[in-house]
Amino acid sequence: MTDTGYNYAYLDEQTKRMIRRAILKAVAVPGYQVPFAGREMPLPYGWGTGGIQVTAAIIGQDDTLKVIDQGADDTTNAVSIRRFFARTAAVKTTEKTVEATVIQTRHRIPETPLTENQIMVYQVPIPEPLRWMEPRETETRKMHALQEYGVMHVKLYEDIARFGHIATTYDYPVMVNDRYLMAPSPIPKFDNPKLNNSPALQLFGAGREKRIYAVPPYTPVKSLDFTDHPFEVQRWDDCCALCGATDSFLDEVITDDKGGRMYVCSDSDYCGDRRAAGHVGPQGVDADAYQRATAAE
Amino acid sequence: MTNQTNAPRPAVSVRDLEKTFVLHTQGGARLPVFAGLTLDVFPGECVALHGPSGAGKSTLLRSLYANYKPGSGQVLVRHGDSTVDMVSATPHQILAVRRHTMGYVSQFLRVIPRVSTLDIVAEPLITLGTAPEEARARARALLTRLRIAERLWSLAPATFSGGEQQRVNIARGFSVPYPVLLLDEPTASLDAANRATVLELITEAKQRGAAVIGIFHDADARAAVADRLFDVLPVPSQAA
Amino acid sequence: MTMIPQTPLLRVEGLTHYYGSRLGCRDVSFDLYPGEVLGIVGESGSGKSTLLSCLSARQDPSSGRVLYQSRHDGEIDLYRVSEPRRRLLMRTEWGIVHQNPRDGLRMTVSAGANIGERLMAVGARHYGDIRDQAIDWLGRVEISDDRTDDLPRTFSGGMQQRLQIARNLVTQPRLIFMDEPTGGLDVSVQARLLDLLRGLVSSLGLSVIIVTHDLAVARLLAHRLMVMKEGQVVETGLTDQVLDDPHHPYTQLLVSSVLQV
């Protein structure tokens, strides 16, 4: 049941149509930032206002929504947004990647491979990858129009000069469809390869900057690099302490005041699935024990 | 062009040259220097400009070099296979004549900060396309002949004495075997030994066929190298 | 012997610019040949900088043409070709040295990256090569290689200016525009910079258009001079002609106003 007093999915129909038009244009020109008339949302900028508007414009009652924040489904922001759409759009929500049709995310792409039936919605704080080098919007637009992207490599050059390798670890710039330079939102560069040739439609919404851009299914997305310093993703010496995964993005968790720490999957759903399937990490407990423990809480 | 006889052609031919300075900062005062001046100088001869101080000898020399712009007339210079009128030539033609054909030794060296003595002397040859090492070898030979101590070669001549600067200037002027040489008091402020060397250089230039036009205040020097004199007389000041 | 000058690199015809009803520069025409250094002199407000902006594709003139003989595509009419073409030209065949290094450098990235940027902008993607070239050019402008990773703001004014020159020259341009490159520098620093510029201009065969109000700088660097007053060219000629035998009243005033040291 939806809350009365609001239109379906909170935004009025005209606004949703306006946003859909922007999305269509974004899909037609992969990587290009389409301006849109962003609305005030009942949450502050920086909490996902761009992503929520995109989700509101595309969601329908048949959809199943998953929201993650830093990979986890159970953080405040993720829970609030899921609840918001449950109330205003009467959609089913889930924490399971495989069940979701729309996944709104901040900072991660799920480890479970996406499918053609899914849409990723990214919350974007700063959509302009060139902003770091060029403060003028008129100039950055011209640079995109003329494909003058050499300056983006200056940032990578500085990394190598200073640290001996490309030290940029998140929001790592990519070229979309060999044409537009794009900020992939603050996902770790670990997730950049998942952007490439993905079967899912990927939409990016920036609420404060009022920009929407997209990567349509099966679009080439290439991370910038130098021929003698090729793009590389992060690797960890440890595996996930709970599920033993060695192929997932790991968060470092401080466990005490004495320097104790553990590494666990940032994707909580992926980690849970693996443990349910019987994988156990060095500090993990088996699935039955885990379920008993969580049920008792 | 029409005449293909063996009669020698002048290297420099001055026709009806006129020069007047107009000083706008002094109420537009007009200072006529010379008018109707005509002079031919042939390869291998040295013509000394002669006349009292202030008569316009230096002005004439500078006009030949197109450093000053005459009001009317022609300065025809044989430049390779062509003839260039320095009065009406384009800047590029003038620079080409100066690079290849016409050398000018002024009274004072224009010092360029931080450029070494050796490079100052070698520069005209290098500009002509001579290999830098060859140009520097020629520069070393000239500096040695003109008795510039070797320890000074790597220094910029800003701090040199007047006589030393003048000798560097002469070395630079004689580095390229120009077909035409303009010399403004080349022997002034030189001691006897160096004066003799400069006169030798002039004589050698004449022997290789250079046309030399010079101002020599020193009568002995003039007598030693000049084949003839050309009188430059002050224009009678016009009654106001 | 090369008697006949080659084709001009730059041909300027009747260049005029008005800011609204106020005159910037009027009816300026000249040719610039390969390897030639043209000085534009005149006091502040005489239209020198406006002219330089119009020449260097940074200011659409009100009327007139700028024709440039490009490396591969023959003569192009600067304000008729597309903006991308013009911007490409500025990255590849042209360079601009600003009076204030802050206008020509990225102050927040290292000296090496400042030089490397022009290379990356034309497609260089090999870090090692880019860095080698950057260090080579730092050496050529007399900056030691241990400063490669320092920010330009830790450099002295003279070093910043030399870095700006290196940044411009690394892509081997053919035409450089300079706006008072020695302005605001101590004389000793000026002398070093001028000497460096003289050497680079002649060894690389660069064509240069240099705006300056300093006649000594003009004499040292320029083959030819254009004297500007109130937006118009009042006298042109070989540098030594203009300075030693000035004809126009304004040029005479300018030359006679220089203090002798």
Image (tube, coloured by chain):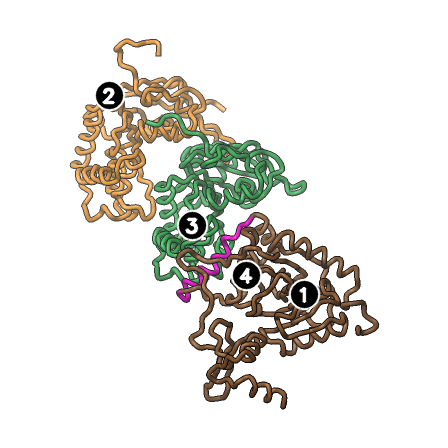
Chain colours: A brown, B orange, C green
Is residue A136 placed above or below C176 in the rendered structure? below
- Badge 3 amino acid: Ile
Where in the figure is residue A54, as x and y percent of width and height? 69, 63
**Which residue was labeled with disc 1?**
A50
Foreground mark, 4 or 3, reads 4
**Which residue was labeled with disc 4?**
A132
- Badge 1 amino acid: Gly
Q: Is most of the magenta stretch helix, strand or loop?
A: helix
Give the residue displayed 37% in from the left and 56% down from the top: C128
Q: Chain of mark 3?
A: C
Same-subunit check for callouts 1 and 2: no
Q: CA distance from mark 4 to mark 2?
A: 72 Å
Q: Are marks 1 and 2 in contact (CB under 8 Å)?
A: no
**Which residue was labeled with disc 3?**
C165
Give the residue displayed 55% in from the left and 70% down from the top: A111
**Which residue was labeled with disc 2?**
B45
- Badge 2 amino acid: Glu
- Badge 4 amino acid: Trp
